[in-house]
Amino acid sequence: MRRLIEDLREEWRDLDRRIEGFDAELVAVAKHDADCRRLTEIPGIGALNATALVAAVGTASAFTRGRDLAAWLGLTPREHSTGGKQRLLGISKRGNKHLRTLMIHGARAALPHLARRCDARGRWLQSLLARAHRNVVVVALANKLARMAWAVLTGQSYRHPTVTAA
């Protein structure tokens, strides 16, 4: 039994080494690509998200606005409206599942840091956290990050929000 467990532990260590190698390769690609470097300036978008976005979307010229990219990722609410009354349902979950998951995980990691800031985005997140469930706020932030990523991929540079006195 001990030999079996040792073999499994060695196999696990080997997989960890291979994963570290792949991660290092993705970081190197992200450092050398101009679009990836600009994307990684956005909070919540790291080397993995940036390389996946650039590989799937390219220059984002297929999308006319940021909302179209967010909808393609499945991060926009589904709408069921009639008679002038707008009803927004949950996110559509259509589109690229892998990229949507990466964006949501990036938003979940960045949420605590961004919500503590005293800029416009921090105040927006704090007000959203006061009235909505944390997971809803994470998806809303992922939607906003996707729109920022579209702007960066279409040639605009990311502008860090200015911090105002509270």
Image (tube, rainbow, N blue to C red):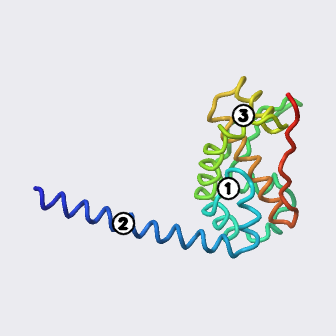
User: Which sits earlier in the primary sequence, circle 1 or circle 2?
Assistant: 2
Q: Is residue 109 above or below residue 128?
A: below
Q: Position of residue 54 (x, y in %)?
A: 70, 69
Identify the image quadrant of residue 141: top right
Quadrant showing the N terminus: bottom left
Would you say the residues marked 3 and 1 are in contact, meaning their CB atoms lie under 8 Å apart? Answer: no
Residue 57 image-quadrant placement: bottom right
Q: 117 above or below 15?
A: above
Which amino acid lies under the numbered mark 3 shown in the image of this protein?
Arg
Q: Is 13 placed left or right of 95 in the picture?
A: left
Name the residue located 72 percent from the left edge and 34 percent from the top edge: 116
Q: Which residue is mark 3?
A: 116
Tell me which residue sits at (85%, 27%) in the image: 166
Instruction: Please give the residue where the numbered disc 2 appears in the rendered image.
Output: 15
CA gap between label 1 and label 2 equals 25 Å
Q: Would you call the spot at circle 1 few (<14 residues within 10 Å), some (14-19), or many (20 or more)?
A: many
**Circle 3: element type:** helix
Q: Report the Cα–Cα distance between label 2 and label 3.
A: 37 Å
Dot 2: what SS?
Answer: helix
Q: Which residue sits at x=59%, y=52%?
A: 101
Q: Which mark is residue 19?
A: none
Q: Which residue is mark 1?
A: 45
The location of residue 93, given as percent across then percent down, is 63, 48
The secondary element bearing badge 1 is classed as loop
